[in-house]
Image (cartoon, rainbow, N blue to C red):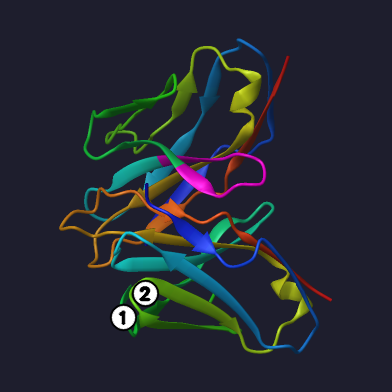
């Protein structure tokens, strides 16, 4: 079956530091890959996505590249801000007729001023 | 903007009560989902629905049922609430639109406490 493994948190960084959150997956077929973000007290919202190998998704300074050879979709940001403090979820959608999303366990990021 | 609305942000119920969590979406999405979110476990799929009156079990359906009588509304039912069902519950909806690339839209969540 499908599964997503992302690095365990929590991750604590200082403002302007470089961020990487690792995500690897197993899936049948050719999945679409997503990063969702959950700010405190809110539901999840889409941060970025990639639908085929070598695609790069980007949004709000975050980037992730779909690497089929390593089955990875690592999230990066060059300079984090306090407002980036949130929980980040890697997810995939693959195959079947109903396109369920499979999520990783989430990584809590705290950015200190 | 797509909106997914969950009827309550916070609920406190007693053990053994029957509990209804309601979710409404306004974008005519075919698929709707119920997840629960627990620390260290991430999001786990309870049930999903791919059409009116159609449903499929997710990874952790035990102790839950669902109802989808109208396309825009998807209800999660705890038949007899237990303390291990204390959790954050998230509803989501998604269009299939002939592709698997579409994003899911989430409600703000219902934090349920069973005492």
**Residue displayed at 24% across by 65% down:** A96
Q: Within the image, what quadrant is residue B43 found in? A: bottom right
- Using residue A100 as the reference point, say whether residue A95 is left or right of it: left
**Residue displayed at 84% across by 76% down:** B115
Q: The residue marked by circle 1 belongs to what chain?
A: B
Question: Does the magenta run of residues contain A44?
Answer: yes
Percent coordinates x, y for residue A77 in the rendering? 49, 19
The front one of B17 and A79 is: B17
State whether discs 2 and 1 lie on one chain.
yes
Task: Give the spatial CA distance, label 2 vs label 1.
Answer: 7 Å
Q: Nearer the viewer, mark 2 or mark 1?
A: 1
Percent coordinates x, y for residue B2 in the rendering? 38, 51
Q: Are marks 2 and 1 in contact (CB under 8 Å)?
A: yes
Q: Secondary structure at mark 2?
A: strand
Q: Is residue A83 above or below residue A52?
A: above
Q: Is residue B88 above or below residue B1?
A: below
**Residue displayed at 34% across by 42% down:** A33
Q: Which mark is residue B52?
A: 1
Percent coordinates x, y for residue A53 in the rendering? 22, 34
Q: Is residue B26 above or below residue B66?
A: above
Q: Residue furthest right?
A: B115
Q: Within the image, what quadrant is residue B16 found in? A: bottom right
Q: Is residue B2 above or below residue A83?
A: below
Q: The residue marked by circle 2 belongs to what chain?
A: B
- Using residue B98 as the reference point, say whether residue B14 is left or right of it: right
Q: Residues within 10 Å of mark 1 (few under 14, many from 20)?
A: some
Residue that carries the numbered disc 2 in the rendered image: B49
Q: Which residues are magenta?
A: A35-45
């Amino acid at each position: 079956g499908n599964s997503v493994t992302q690095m365990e948190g929590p991750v604590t960084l200082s403002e302007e530091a470089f961020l990487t959150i690792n995500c690897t997956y197993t899936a049948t077929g050719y999945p679409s890959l997503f990063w969702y973000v959950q700010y405190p007290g809110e539901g999840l919202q889409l941060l970025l996505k990639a639908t085929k190998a070598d695609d790069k998704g980007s949004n709000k300074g975050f980037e992730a590249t779909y690497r089929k050879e390593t089955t990875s979709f690592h999230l990066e940001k060059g300079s984090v801000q306090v407002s980036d403090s949130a929980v980040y979820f890697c997810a995939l959608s693959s195959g079947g007729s109903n396109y369920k999303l499979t999520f990783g366990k989430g990584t809590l990021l705290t950015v200190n001023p | 903007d797509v909106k997914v609305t969950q009827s309550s942000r916070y609920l406190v119920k007693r053990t053994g009560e029957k509990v209804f969590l309601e979710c409404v979406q306004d974008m005519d999405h075919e698929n709707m989902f119920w997840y629960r979110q627990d620390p260290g476990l991430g999001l786990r799929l309870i049930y999903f629905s791919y059409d009116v009156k159609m449903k499929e079990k997710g990874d952790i359906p035990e102790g839950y049922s669902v109802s989808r009588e109208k396309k825009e509304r998807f209800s999660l039912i705890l038949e007899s609430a237990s303390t291990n069902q204390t959790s954050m519950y998230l509803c989501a909806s998604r269009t299939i639109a002939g592709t698997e690339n579409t994003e899911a839209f989430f409600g703000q969540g219902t934090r349920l406490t069973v005492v």
